[in-house]
Amino acid sequence: MTQLIQYASLRPTPWKNGGGSTTEIVVAPPGADFDHFDWRISLATITQDGPFSPFPGIDRSLALVDGDGVLLDFGHERFVLSPSEPLIEFPGESTVEATITGDLTTDFNVMTRRGRCRHRLERRVVSGRQELARRSNTTVLFLADGESLTLSSATERIALVRYDAVVLDTDQAWTMDTIQATVLVADIIPH
């Protein structure tokens, strides 16, 4: 079943440490908490420097959506999530200190529980009409930048505005149509 998730209907939850907020977009199984999800996709806004919460047994991907970016310090390695390097993957149990490089940063976050599923996250710039390449039976498309995008199959037509998402869990072929947009495509692959 195809599911449109309108950003306007979602509510952010403040972090316990006060350093930002998280807006859950979709979680599987539905209603699962942090200890029981198979996979989870959210939008996080980081407003101040501080540590990331640890998620043992979880694989994570972050994609910069808005802002100047964030410096991620893993202790032995540093990475700047920025417009020129907008994607990173790392294990959830990693100790990570975040330092924002501007006023705030907004990041798309994909988490999958090892042993149950894995994911692939891709950032695509779309102009005009393009096919949506999928690598699994469950794909989440997120409109990261651009005013609007139309997603079409042989039987459905879905209009998205910025920060809307669509969960696709059928084998249908889909096309994207927009003047100019940046989308994030997360494929969820079961084990």
Image (cartoon, rainbow, N blue to C red):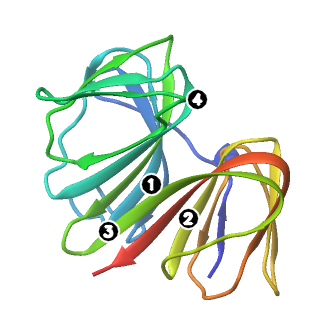
Q: Which mark is residue 156?
A: none
* Earlier sequence position, callout 4 versus callout 2: 4
Q: Position of residue 175 (x, y in %)?
A: 77, 72
- The residue tagged 4 is 66
Name which residue type carries label 2. Answer: Val
- The residue tagged 3 is 118
Name which residue type carries label 4. Answer: Asp
Residue at image x 70%, y 83%?
Answer: 173
**Mark 4, residues whose alpha carbon is within 10 Å: few (<14), some, or many (≥20)?**
some
Give left or right: position of 74 versus 168. left
SS for dot 1:
strand
Q: Are the residues flagged by discs 3 and 1 in contact, CB closer than 8 Å?
A: no
Residue at image x 15%, y 40%?
Answer: 94
- The residue tagged 2 is 140
Q: In whole angstroms, how far apart are the C-alphas of marks 1 and 4? A: 17 Å
Q: Are the residues flagged by discs 4 and 3 in contact, CB closer than 8 Å?
A: no
Compared to residue 105, the image places residue 189 above or below, namely below
* Earlier sequence position, callout 2 versus callout 3: 3
Q: In whole angstroms, how far apart are the C-alphas of marks 4 and 3? A: 25 Å
Q: Which mark is residue 41?
A: 1
Quarter of the image where the C terminus is located:
bottom left
SS for dot 2:
strand
Name which residue type carries label 1. Answer: Ile
Q: In whole angstroms, how far apart are the C-alphas of marks 2 and 1? A: 9 Å
Give left or right: position of 180 versus 71. right
